[in-house]
Amino acid sequence: MTKRPHISVKTKVSVAIEQAMTITCPLCWYPLTASDDRILEHMVPHELGGASDITNLRWVHKECAAKKTNGNKATVAGGDIHKIAKAKRLATKHSQPKPLGTMKSRGFQGSKRFNGEINWRNK
């Protein structure tokens, strides 16, 4: 996993201003208060092509961000880590050329005698 990209203070303030009208966490829909642990989260993971700009960043509860990244406790299939790993597996699988199969010969369709004559077998 790559290191999180640096997000400038200007971007953080812009996201905060844009989200000021909606003071709820976009993941759990509970209110975000000043006393909550918050984190600036990429809605589309950065490793899956998500931008580090105002269109893709949202303030969320720290616990919600952890659930989004790691998935639920019962399964990790819904988490960003699972999606990133799957994307890497598929990219690796489809970027490698398929091995060519070996050509199978029908074999020699006749018999050769010691004097050099060839007797062809009928099909």
Image (cartoon, rainbow, N blue to C red):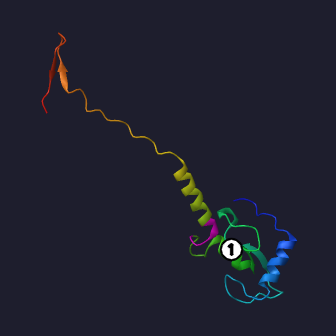
In the displayed structure, does residue 103 sit left or right of residue 23? left
- The residue segment tinted magenta is 77-82
Q: Secondary structure at mark 1?
A: loop
- Residue at 70 percent of width and 65 percent of height: 46
Image side of residue 49 versus residue 9, left or right:
left
Q: Residue at x 75, y 67 (%)?
A: 52
| Residue type pointed to by label 1 | Met
In-front residue for pair 121/71: 121
In the rendered view, tell whether residue 5 sits above or below residue 29. Answer: above
**Which residue lies most toward the left here?**
122
Write down the quadrant of residue 31 in the picture: bottom right
Q: Which quadrant would the C terminus be assigned to in this image?
A: top left
Where is residue 95 shown, x and y percent of the image?
A: 55, 49
Left or right for 86, reference 38: left
Q: Please, which residue is most extreme toward the top here?
A: 115
As for residue 95 lying within the magenta part, the answer is no
Name which quarter of the figure residue 11 lies in. bottom right
Say which residue label 1 marks: 43
The residue lying at 52 percent from left, 52 percent from top is: 94
The image shows residue 14 at horizontal and vertical percentages of 82, 77
Residue 71 placed where, x, y %? 62, 73
Q: Residue furthest right?
A: 9
Residue 41 lies, with reference to residue 105, above or below; the image says below
Give percent across and percent down for residue 118: 17, 18
Quadrant location of the N terminus in the rendered image? bottom right
Rate crowding at label 1 as few (under 14), some (14 to 19) or many (20 or more) other CA atoms within 10 Å.
many
Q: Total marks drawn?
A: 1
